[in-house]
Amino acid sequence: MIKQLEFSYEVEKPDPVVTEFHPPSNEKLANALKEVATFLQVQGANRFRVEAYYRAVNVLLALETPAWQIYEREGIQGLEKIPAIGRTISKALQQMIRGGRWPLLERLNGNDSIEQAFASVPNIGPVFAKRIHEELELETLAELQAAAWDGRLAKLPGMGEKRLRAVRESLAGRGRYQHVLPHEPDELDVTHKIPVGEILDVDDQYLFEARHDTLPRVSPKHNNPTHEAWLPILHTERGERHYTALFSNTAHAHQLGTHKNWVVVYLEDHRHIGQHGRWTVITSQFGKLRGKRIVRGRERECEVYYRDRVG
């Protein structure tokens, strides 16, 4: 049986009523990278990936110019020019500089506080933030911004035209460091491009190792009243792609009793490119795919995948 892992430090929680914040120092950025490196190391991730984060820590601590100033002047391309800071780590620095949080760090210590980030957006608040997370299954501020424009957010009861307009304006950025998000599509998000077969293969590995208790486990900070380290976490590779997989720990999954069936798969990075993606894999309850593992939202591709395997 693998030893359970408990972590005592917490991710910094944003003030629910304050949306502006000071840009992080190089020391603060380096400490976040070091925490991720430590998590990855004890959770059995690829050692080359771990070493890359440690190298970046040393470079940031020795850097005379604040990284946020480099980003302000030159954008993400400026961060990539810093020695040992490739596309993946520069994207992480960008997230922390622009939004004050790093989803990867929060996932690795079992404390994905996206609801707190949503609640910090004016005209949303904690109750509505929870509904957005649970009902629309959004995971990032960028996804929230997309939902504010493509009609999904408008469909939620209580999201009137005035409120929706205020949310859009806030996410577009008022003030230097206030939820500044790009208007153009994120070309690095490959959620709809990675073959479903690869995602299902990661899901299969995760379920197999979780059943046989060979994975390290973290203690989620949410939906875990007993503070038990029950959530298995997998780090694995497919070629140069680094994946993290873990059971869904949303309140909705617990209510349905699927928190040990629904698996969330993250593509954390792609060496030298920084691609990312997120998928939820479930057991289908209907139709031709009943009883089979499918990638939610890509059911037709899964149907073709299983048909080709039989053929």
Image: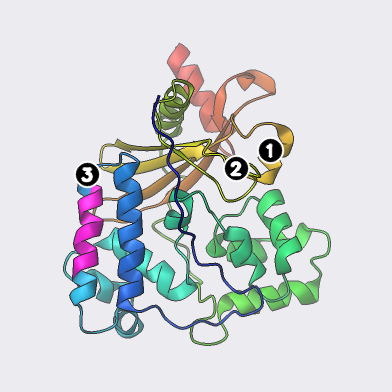
Mark before the other along the chain sequence, 2 or 3: 3
Kindly indicate the quadrant of the structure image that contains residue 15: bottom right
Q: Nearer the viewer, residue 250 or 80?
A: 250
First reached walking from the N terminus: tag 2 or tag 1: 2
Q: CA distance from mark 2 to mark 3?
A: 27 Å
From the image, tell me which residue sits under label 2: 249
Q: Residue type at mark 2: give it.
A: Asn
Across and down, in percent, residue 213 comes to 44, 24
Is residue 132 placed above or below 198 in the rendered structure?
below
Q: For the point 40% across and 24% down, which residue is it?
A: 1
Residue ID for mark 3: 47
The percent coordinates of residue 12 (x first, y second) are 50, 67
Magenta-span inclusion, residue 51? yes
Q: Residue at x 54, y 60 (%)?
A: 140
- The residue drawn where x is 42% and y is 67% is 95
Q: Is residue 103 left or right of residue 258?
A: left
Give the Cα distance between marks 1 and 3.
34 Å
Which contiguous range is marked in magenta? Answer: 49-58
Q: Main secondary structure of the magenta part?
A: helix
The residue wearing badge 1 is 254
Q: Is residue 129 above or below residue 212?
A: below
Where disc 1 sits, the SS reads helix
Indicate whether residue 233 is drawn in magenta: no
